[in-house]
Each structure stands twice: as structure tokens, then as C-alpha cells.
Image (cartoon, rainbow, N blue to C red):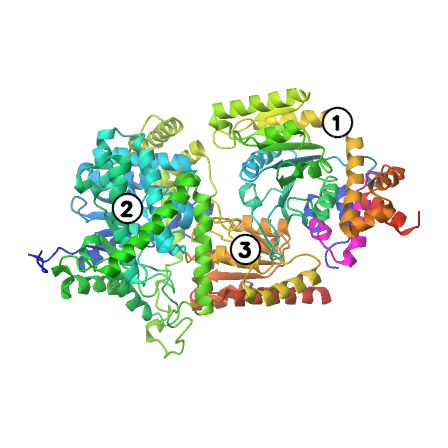
Amino acid sequence: MSGPSGTELAERLRGGDLTAAPAVLNLVENAAPAARDEIAALLRGVSPAALGGEARAHVVGVTGPPGVGKSTLLSELVRAWRTAGRTVAVLAVDPSSRRSGGALLGDRARIAYDPEDPGTFIRSTAAGTRLGGLAPATRAAAHALAAAFDVVVLETVGVGQSETEVAEVADTVAVIVQPGSGDVLQFLKSGIMEIPDVLVVTKADLGDVAVRAQRDLRAALRSIGRRGTAVVAVSSVSPVRGIDELVAALDAHRAGLDVAARRLAARRAGALADFAAEHGERGVRALGGRRVARRVLEEQAAGADVPALTAALESRAGAPS
Amino acid sequence: MSHRLPERDRPWMMRTYAGHSTARKSNELYRSNLAKGQTGLSIAFDLPTQTGYDPDDELAKGEVGKVGVPIAHKGDMHALLDGIPLGEMNTSMTINATAAWLLALYIVAAEEQGVEQSALQGTTQNDIIKEFLARGTYAFPPAPSLRLIADMVAYTVTEVPRWNPINICSYHLQEAGATPVQEIAYAMSNAIAVLDAVRERVPQELMGKVFGRISFFVNAGVRFIEEHAKLRAMGILWEELGRERYGVQDPKHLRFRYGVQVNSLGLTEQQPENNVQRIVLEALAVTLGRDARARALQLPAWNEALGLPRPWDQQWSLRIQQVLAYETDLLEYPDVFEGSKVMDALVAELLEGARAEMAAVDEHGGAVAGVDYMKAALVDSHRERLRRIESGDQVVVGLNRFQGTEHSPLTDDAEGGILVVDPATEAEQREAVIAWRADRDQAAVDAALAELARVAAGTEDNIMPATIAAARAGATTGEWSRTLREAFGEYRAPTGVGEAAADAGAADLEPLREEVDRVSEALGRRLKILVGKPGLDGHSNGAEQIAVRARDVGMDVVYEGIRLTPAQIAASALQEGVHVVGLSILSGSHRELIPAVVRELRERGVEAPVIVGGIIPEQDVEPLRAAGVSAVYTPKDFDINQIMADVVALVAEHNGAAASA
């Protein structure tokens, strides 16, 4: 293994050293068997037990269909956060299929940032095996970077299922929709889609169309009894507007959140997903199914990190029940 | 009809695309070209001028005076045109994002010569859509860019009535890999987008005149029969469009008028003398048939694939035109293809294909909304072309067949047969613009720019009067552009690579994929490459093809498009954790920019090896290697799979060495 050890990286993250981020990603993306223990050491070093509480960052999921203007919006969000003095890490999950094994990671192209600014970190990662799914490495990266950055963004593509997976990692999920596209309305009403914490309507420069989209979404949310969900209209073309409102809406959601409970749920869901990724459905059945798996996870200490939880599942699966 | 013309036709306008170093040096070149029998001017601007930066801007580094002349203010324009009678001259300016500004400087320079703007003749290229698609020198987002074009058309149609405010370019589409059908269809779709925008800003009774002022800038490749058919097809479509969509009736307004620069994409670095016959044949494509003959012609030089041409190289190309026009009998006959079954059938075939493709663009929302669609289609076509050359299905003499050659004496001189711009030029121009700013009436400039900002922020007023006032007051290219960037916002065009289809079926990629998999496994994660284009050069075809092929053989590819600073590339390489960095430059600024990228990488602790591709003269290869570059590729390296194999081996070696250390 080249590069710094997991223990060293965890220590740097705990000390707020943002320059550790590239090496952290290089490590968590490493699938070689030799890297496994290092990754476990890294995550142990940034677990609530090691930190003495939940990691500081606001973990924000930003998701929406292709072409909706996510990256341009993110560009403006990053600018707003940095202006407010908050450090930001963006994990851009690229949906491109791996037909040939390779992927074109193009998203960072649309996020403008100052290359000399140590407070902004952007990493493109390929999607997991499913289209739009989160790779285990991305979840691990979000957990680790949350110890050092003020904001960690997970950017994914899709509507209808990807936000469910993002919700398992993020404190706050924002779904981006484009005015005039009916999918989100249908998904919301029919219950196909989990209710996001914040709904963002882009292209507010379109005027009436955007206003109508905003109104329709509010009506849909009312009809399913979710008046609390913020709906924000933004325009990321000049003149840019709505960004401050969006930042405020994200912050308001975080302020009203039981972070410890959400993170605990996130770690448990992550451990189960990692276990399933590693051992397949057959492995889950050997555990006695997902219900048993969840019970096993609930028996573990609240401050335990994901690899420890995964290990607990593995030891249960290996032992005759 | 007689088979002879009653009198010999007048020749087309002969130009040479020229400009380099400084306004004064370019002026000398223009005067000597005119003395040699050239009949019009074609101004090449450097990349900072084209993209709206002054010579002292951070982004201008390495690019000042390289691919054209730097024009920062009216003083430069005055020096550029000194002693050239603007009332008689017909000047073509290859300028797009900053076209309104350069036209304003031209108008002010003419004023100083005592020539009224109504007497000026010429063309501003001003085709922004092809900049998003192929050439890369855009500055503002699509909507305000189209507004600038519409303003220029509306202004010139009454105030500078002999000016062609826009040249719809299919030239660069072919350079980016377009097939003849794509070239026709995208050019026409582009014209529709422009004319629709103009229609909003001029009264209907002027539309005939406006339509008549739109000219085209076309390419011609070496398949010269088909290329000629392409031009006939464009003429038919253009007339149809005028009648049906814009209600134009005057036949004079409906005529398809075009200028040409023939193909550079097909010119080779190997046996470069062969390029001369390619250029001659391509010139025939646009002159042979009288019914679709070019109005103006400029020919590239034989050594374009090697570097910048010298005055002698350009003279050779001008002489080709003169032999064609004055020695041959070409201009003595009516249209020689009239009644040709082959020609008629070829034209019909192209028309059918082009109509279908225009409908596809229309379904994608027209040329502005459909930029992503067209860009991806072009990247695909170019990939297809390269694959045919690699496999030998398309023969390129001296490149993939008949490679054995005697030594060419043409490249024997110290510079390797090309023009080398004096490296001191950039520093001189930097200081000159600083001196210019210090020496002018600053209050007048501030007031003019404030007015420009006001006009830009609104939608009612035409941008031209405020732009001309700013030019007159002594504002600079960078100041004009910055004012508009602040009003309009910045923009990054689509790269086209994300959407390009994967070449999954190609069996010859299998061994490479296995090798990439093997090395990726050894690395622990997938082999990751960053493809970067430092500087202002927008010619991204090479970089795009490398990115797509790297993806197709199984690599993770980070490609952020054009116009990046060395610091941006280095920061991306660090954050993305790439194993190798590939850089592409065609503007001749590699000697400054490549070492700067390597330095920025190493300062950030990125040890990944760096490879470089582009138009890199032989004598520059060693200095680049000395600066830390592992490999240099030039146009003669057409086998992309070989480049991929080299990259994989380089990464394996680099990491193997690192692991055992």
C-alpha cells in the first residue's frame, strides 16, 4: 500500500486537515484486500466513539434527473457556502454506465471553484453497480470527510430511487426538479418517491412556468400532508437568485433534525448495504433476512463505525443461529 | 445556351488568413501580401483577443501573438491597418465572441482615416454556435451571445450596409469531424437560430436585406466531387429557407454566398509536401462549378500540421489560387456540371440526408438548445473517421499507406520549416497595454463602460453604439469583455464526450481492456486519467478523442473541457487522484504552458506522469521532456490504441517503481 495509513488520515481529519481529502478518497476507493484494514482503521478513527460525538459536517444530498442543472446550481451553492466561510467537499457520483469498465467523469467541469482555495474539494466517483446507486466507497468517503469539512455534498443523478439511497447517508436531501416536468409530481403523489427534505425548482428565470411548478409542488405536498417541506425556486443563470433562500432552507432542515438518530440509522443502513454488496442476497439470507440483520445492528453500540457493524453482521452470518 | 461565356468571369476574392506577433508586424505582412496580388484581407486574431482578454491577463499567458495578432484597443487597430485604404479594402475578420468590439475598433480606425462606416466592406465571422460546437472561443452564454449577433445584424443592415455581419461557419464543423450531411444540416440549423433571433430585432420589411447579408464560411475536403455537390445542396436549401421561412422574394437576396478555407484536418505531418496537391484539389471543389463557386477563397499552407506558416508558405498558397484563376480556363465556361446525372444524384442524396438531420436538430429544440446533441454527434463522427484511418479503410497517403519516403528538404532550416514567434513579444504587448491604460482619459473610459454595462443589462438598446463609443474612448478588449461578462455571466460549453456512445463492439479493444483491468487491479482502483486543455486554445477534437477512447478501453476519465489554467488542471489532478495526466495544445503555447502545468502538479505533490499531444514541432520535444513530460504525441501518431497502450504501460511502470521504492 502506498500513501498514508488509515490511522494517520483519520488523525489528520480529526485535526481539521482538509488536505487529507485526496488521500482519503484514494484509500476508500481502493478495492485491494490489503486496503480493507486501512479503510476500517480510517473509519474507526472518525467514528462517533473516536470523535466524542457525531461528525460536525452537514451532509447534504443533491439529486435530480439529468439535464436539470444540478451542477450549475451546485456551483452557486459552493460559492455561497465558501463566501459564508464554510468549507465544502463535493462527491459527484457520475451515472455513466460502465459498459467497457471505464467512465467519463464530467461533472466537476460545471462546478466553478478557485483552484487555490483549500476549503473546496471536489471528487468525481463512478456510480455503484446499479445505475445511480452509491458505491460503498462513496458512503465511506462521506462519513470520513464529515469529520473535517463543514459541508459534505453527495451529488447523484436520478429521480424515484436514488434519493432513497442518498437519504441513507445524508442529513438533508434536496431534490432538484425542472419546471414543466411532471415526473416528480407523479412520483410524489403515487408514493414511488420518498419525500425529500427540500424541493428545488430550477430555471426560475423562466418566470411563470417556474412559479406554476412551485405552486403545483406545494399543492402535491399539501395533498399528502407534508406542509413542512420547503419548496425553493432558484435561477443559476445571470441574474442568479434563490441561492440564499436555498442555503437557509437546508440549514433550517438541519437545525430541526435529530442528527444523532439520523446518522445512527445511516451507519446501520450503510453496514447492511456493504454487507449485501460483499456477500450478495445469499449472504443476507444466511443471516436470516434483513429483519434479523437490522436487529443484529440495533444490538451494537450507537457509536460504532460502519466496518465494525459490517463485521458484526459477518460474524453473525458465519455463526450458526 | 453557349458552352462558352461571352466574357471571362472575374476571379473570386483571394485572401490569406494571416496575423501574428504584433499589429505592426502584421501590418507589414498585409502590405506585402497585397503587393503580391492578394485582393482582400483576412485577419487572424490571437486567442486572448478572440476570447476577450488583454495581453496582461493571467489567462493570456503563453498565447499573446501566437495564432494571430493581438488587438487590445483602437491604437492597435490603427497600427494594424496603417496605410491600407479601408474605403476600398474588403476585410474578413475571424472574430466571434468579441466580434461587436472588433467591428467597433475597425469603424473607429476607418473614422481616423476619414472613411465613413457606410463605405466599409467586409465580414465579421460572428458565428457563436460553432464556437460552442467546435472552435471554443466563446465568452458569454448562448442567449446573450445571440443577442449580440442580432444587435450587430440590426445595426449594420442600416449603418454599415455593405458589411456581412455574420458568416455562418460550417468550416469548423468539418474540422471537428462532420460528415457532409452534418456540415450542411448544422450550418442551416445554425442560420435558422440566428435569423429567428434577428427577426425579433428588425422590422419585417428589412428581413430580405438581412437575409441577403448572411454569408457562409465553408470547408472543402479532398473528396472534391462530393464536396462540390455539398455546396450545390447548400445553395438549394438556402433559397428554400429564405422563401419559405422568412418570406424573402428578391432573387439577389436569396443567393447563397460563401467564402472558403479548405480543409486542414486532412493535412499531414508526414511527407508534408503532399499537402500541396490536397490543397489544389480542395480548391477545385469550390471553384469548378460556376453555379456554386466561392466568392472568396483562402488556402491553408502546406506546413499547417507542423506549426505556424511563414510568409513564403502563405505565398505558395496564394500562387495556387492565381494559377487556377489566371492560367487555367476555369473561368471561361458556364457551369460545367449542369445536366450531370452523377452531380444531380449526389446533390439529391445530400439534400435528403441534410433535411432529415435538420429535423433531428429541430426535435432537440433547434441549434441553441440542440448544441449538446450536435456536439455529441460530431464527436461520434470524428471517432468514426479516426477508426477508419487506424484500420486503413480510409487511405491517407504517407500516413497509413505509402509511408516510405525520401528525406524532405522542405523542413531543413533551423526552425523546421515553420514560423516561430519571438518569445519577447508577449512581455512587450503586456507592457504596451499597461502604458496605454495609463495614458488615456480614464474618466471618459469609465463613463463609456458604465453606459455599456447599462445597455447590456437591459434588452431594449442595441449594443453597437455604446460599444463604438467605448472603442473611441480608448477602452481595451479585456475591459469591454469584462463588462459584458459581468452583465451576462460566464459559460462552459458541453464537451460532447459524456454523451458519445461507447464503442463496445470493437473487438480490437479487448486486449487493451484486459490490460487496463489488470493494471487497475494491481493499483487497487480503476486506472484514472485526467485529460486537460491548458490555455485559451479551443481546438478540443484531439482531447475529446483521447478521452472517449480512454473510456472505451476501461479507464476512468476526468475531462473538464477547454480553457483551464495550469493551477486548475493541477488542482483537479490532485483532488481526483488520477494516475496520469494527458495535456493537449494546438496553439503553439506549449513551451510556456506545459512546464507550468508540470510545475503546479509537482508543487501540489502530484507525481503522476504527464503526456502531451498537439502540434508540437520536433525541436520542442526535448525541452518538454526536460521539463518533466514523459511522452509527446503529434498528428503523425494517428494510432490512438497505441497511445492507450503506452499510457497503461507508463502508469504500470510508474506505480511499480513507486511500490518497490
Tag in front: 2 or 3 = 2
Describe residue B171's horizontal placement relative to residue A197 as left or right.
Answer: left
The amino acid on which the numbered mark 2 sits, given as a three-letter code, is Leu
Quadrant for residue B342, please give it: bottom left
Residue with the mark numbered 1? A257
Q: CA distance from mark 2 to mark 3?
A: 33 Å
- Is B310 in front, or is B635? B635
Describe residue B303's horizontal placement relative to residue B503 as left or right.
Answer: left
Q: Residue at x 77, y 42 (%)?
A: A270
Residue with the mark numbered 2? B237
Q: Position of residue A88 (x, y in %)?
A: 65, 38
Q: Secondary structure at mark 1?
A: loop
Q: Chain of mark 3?
A: B
Residue with the mark numbered 3? B502
Quadrant for residue A49, please give it: top right
Query: Is residue B348 depicted above or below B252 in this figure?
Result: below
Query: Is residue B235 depicted above or below B490 in this figure?
Result: below
Q: CA distance from mark 1 to mark 2?
A: 62 Å
Q: Which residues are magenta?
A: A24-48
Tag in front: 1 or 2 = 2
Tag in front: 3 or 1 = 3
- Observer able to see residue A141: yes
- The disc, 2 or 3, on the residue closer to the chain's N-terminal end is 2
Magenta region, mostly helix, strand or loop?
Answer: helix
The amino acid on which the numbered mark 1 sits, given as a three-letter code, is Leu
Q: Position of residue B468 (x, y in %)?
A: 29, 34
Q: Residue at x 81, y 50 (%)?
A: A282
Q: Chain of mark 1?
A: A
